[in-house]
Image (cartoon, rainbow, N blue to C red):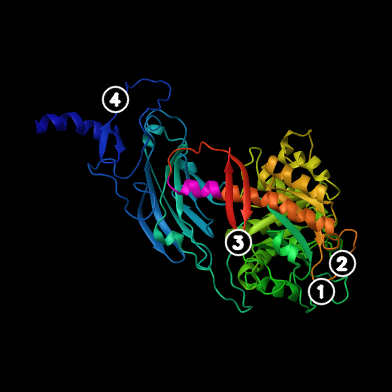
Amino acid sequence: MVSNLLLTFLPISLAHQVLYVPGYYAPLPLQPLVHQPVVHYALPQQHGNRKHEFVSGVSYHGNCADSTVDWQEAEDGVAANVRVKRPAGRSLYAAAPWSVDLVWDHPVSSIQFYNGQAFQTGATTYKVGPIAATQYVVASQQDEVNFSFKAEFNPNLRRPGLQGIVVDGAYHTCTPGPKAAKNAISNKITDYGVQYTPVSWPKRILGLYILLADDSEDGYDSAADWEPELFTWQQESSNVLFFTFIHPGTMEIPPSFKKLAKTRGSSAPGSVPADTVIMFAIGGYAYSLKPNPWDWLTSREKAEAMAEKVARWPEEYGCDGIDLDLEEGAGAKREAGPNMIHFIRKLKSLKPDIIISQPVYGYPQVQAESDVINASWDTEGNSQGLADSLGLMVYEGTQALNYVKNYAKGSNQWQGFPIKVNAPTNTILLGAKGSSSSTTLVKLATEAVKQDLLGIMVWYASVKNGFDYAANWDASTKADSISGYKQAFDILNKDNAASKVGSAAAEAGSDEPAAVAVKDINLIDDVVTVELQ
């Protein structure tokens, strides 16, 4: 009986006609050796190093089971050998060379491949194929793919983990080991006394550009030492603050930025609330005319060197992201856009969680801004790991709504249109004039929820003890505007609360989809009351 079993199953196993299923192997039927279309079996497509072992699958290490061997992990990176079996139906009859993608959950600092040639396809993804010498080897000789890699991590940033391996288009999920979850920079006290607790983009935003530094304003230049404080309505009616502006010629953080950021979560008078996002705005209209060009955007080397400096800002000064307000003048320089992309890519590799916002004109007129947008998404709305949002610098009434299509449907516009991609609507901020009427602000907030837009950005608002460009633009000078911000924020905040309720329900462990709809949400003393339809 044993001899008969061996005669039956051993040839099948040696011919690689086996399929891994957790706990056992199921032999696949042999196919006649004739030319025929590629066959994709209905059974799950598996792969792995253990295709000849009659044991249940157990990972050799903390990452993809049965996909990597000789996994060696250190504080500054990992080295491993990837060995996978091509999916059944591809290995014997497919004519195309093999293709393997590595998907990380955070960007790696650098990565090298051996016995395979690779290129980066996104901020966290790499595609590997055969080296040129074996590119056209028949597929029957490529049943097993074998290559190595060495990835280096930045020890001061969130540690990457291997999230998935894609073999010939078949995705295999990995479970990063415990080391991958380590975050070396959480909650540390810096020399400036900042408690570094990163805050993420809310689902819906009401963001205020607040005036803190301007070299043209006496007593409020980039080096001026004064005590900024928020008004109560700013604390209660916004969840993002754009600190305005950093001089692009020096890229030094003004004392006013440091002082106000330091108050976050302190509950001191005029302080920044603990859950408010802090964005440092760089440039602006005047600083785009002079200096022109921005020196750190004149070469890739300078741009990446500046990224290394900016990557330290969150820990040193307590910001969560930066706003790249590069406008006409410096933004029209041919090299500005490509070098800004190099800057962002390098910054994201060093600081993956940093938020990048890109202001744009309603009609795309600044080449560098368009370059960044075109590099940040594709025609399907997929993020390329660069900018996280874009803000429409259209501030009269509700006119910003008219320009959403220029970016959400950029690839659908006429031939030669500057925007070639389609940014997701939930990455787009509507511009609002500081002194907008309450009716306008409520309309913008309502449409933001209705059209699934990111929210509203406001140009501009002065703060206590600060300066003011023009009272007829300032959000802090009109009672009706302040009332409008409270109403608009309530609308946006209710949608944020609904999102949190939905997330909490999902985390509760229910396998069934929710069969309810939210009719209304009330926020009373920080208690969320949800009325269902």
> Which numbered tag is attached to residue 199?
3
Task: Give the extent of the magenta segment.
Answer: 501-509
Q: Residues within 10 Å of mark 3 (few under 14, many from 20)?
A: some
Q: How many marks overall?
A: 4
Give the mark toward the camera: 4 or 2.
2
Gap in angstroms between the C-alphas marked 3 and 1: 26 Å
Question: Regarding mark 2 in the picture, which secondary structure is present there?
Answer: loop
Contact (CB < 8 A) between labels 2 and 1? no
Gap in angstroms between the C-alphas marked 2 and 1: 10 Å
Whichever of labels 3 and 1 marks the residue nearer the N terminus, that label is 3
Gap in angstroms between the C-alphas marked 4 and 2: 79 Å
Q: Residues within 10 Å of mark 4 (few under 14, many from 20)?
A: few
Contact (CB < 8 A) between labels 3 and 1? no
> Which numbered tag is attached to residue 465?
1
> Which numbered tag is attached to residue 30?
4
> Which numbered tag is attached to residue 468?
2
Looking at this rendering, what residue extends furthest in the left direction?
A: 1
- In this rendering, the answer to whether 409 lies above or below 347 is above
Question: Regarding mark 3 in the picture, which secondary structure is present there?
Answer: loop
Give the mark toward the camera: 1 or 4.
1
The amino acid beneath tag 1 is: Asn
The amino acid beneath tag 4 is: Leu
Whichever of labels 4 and 2 marks the residue nearer the N terminus, that label is 4
Question: Regarding mark 1 in the picture, which secondary structure is present there?
Answer: loop
Whichever of labels 1 and 4 marks the residue nearer the N terminus, that label is 4
Question: Regarding mark 4 in the picture, which secondary structure is present there?
Answer: loop
